[in-house]
Amino acid sequence: MDVGIEIGGTKLQVAIGDPHTGKIGEIFRYQVDKALGAEGILTQIEKTLLALPYPPARIGIGFGGPVNRTAGVIATSHQIGGWSGFELLQWFKHRFEAPVFMDNDANVAALGEAHFGAGKGCKQVFYITLGSGVGGGLVCDGALYHGNAPGEAEVGLLQLDRQGNNLESFCSGWALDAKIRKLLPALPNESALKQLVGFQQSGEAKFVLPALNQGDRHAAELLSEYADTLAWGLSHVVHLFNPQIIVLGGGVSLIGEALRVQVQEALPKYLVKAFQPGPLVALAELKEETVLVGALCLLNQ
């Protein structure tokens, strides 16, 4: 019985699954209590694994932050305290007999989508997660590309100007939330986006799609600007790696086809002629299971 684990800044997922088929069996999902820090997450993992009917044979982990995968050490977490320098593989070794493999969650997600998701059958797959942060992963011929420790393919850290603004500054879920908050006071009261958000002060991005479905032009303009900036950032990925496919994942990608189409259409104008029209842009197919499936795929790397 193999186990995949996703350790994020807001959620923890533990699943039983098959790395050869990508099929997930039972999933245990938990909200992360930031006040409890890393210790709270580790306690929940241990409790969940010990409650399984059989001890795990192998464990794959996707961690939400930079890691030293060979040393088994967490570099840091940008959301949860207590992770910096933590020896995660040693922690597992002292509690379970199963071999453990770990990597950054965006890398792991890329692996899952390359083998069993939108990138299946493609030789080069670049995955970008558009969540609370922006991360990336590159898979070539079924294997993850790894740079020197502590990471690689950090597309969110691409500097888009000399003032230190990077792709994450513009295209993370938090950045989109902030942009909507700033825009709302200037919107007319009849705006669907304004009515849907109401007095909410976080997670505003989730109302973009329903506002679009109601024909809100302000939501359409917001999405157009967002997609254009994302395409600009992804043009650097194309010029560096020229992948066969770029897969959009993470919470913002749930806007769906409206986002995918606009990124696909905007991308060529930022590419030199030789690279046009650019790779196929697709939406992640594995949804909430992307990191879990990828974590299981680590067991076959």
Image (cartoon, rainbow, N blue to C red):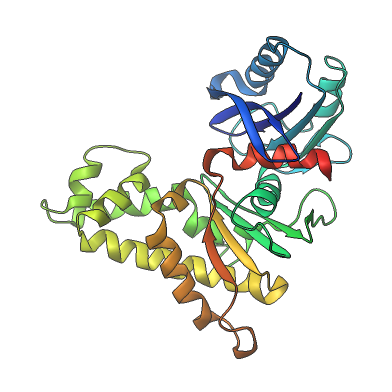
Up-down: is 166 above or below 1? below
Position above or below: 252 against 15 = below
- Is 238 above or below relative to 1? below
Q: Is the N terminus in the top left, top right, bottom left or bottom right quadrant?
A: top right
The mark total stands at 0
- Rendered image quadrant of residue 27: top right
User: What percent of the width, then of the height, locates residue 227?
Assistant: 43, 66
Front one among 150 and 287: 287
| Residue at image location 48% in from the left, 71% down from the top | 264
Residue 66 to residue 255: above or below: above
Q: Nearer the viewer, residue 203 or 77?
A: 203
Q: Nearer the viewer, residue 106 or 17?
A: 17
Residue furthest left as drawn = 190
Q: Is residue 22 left or right of residue 171?
A: right
Q: Residue furthest bottom?
A: 273
Query: Where, quadrant-wise, is the C terminus in this rendering?
Result: top right
Q: Residue 248, located in which quarter of the rendered image? A: bottom right
Residue 60 location, quadrant: top right
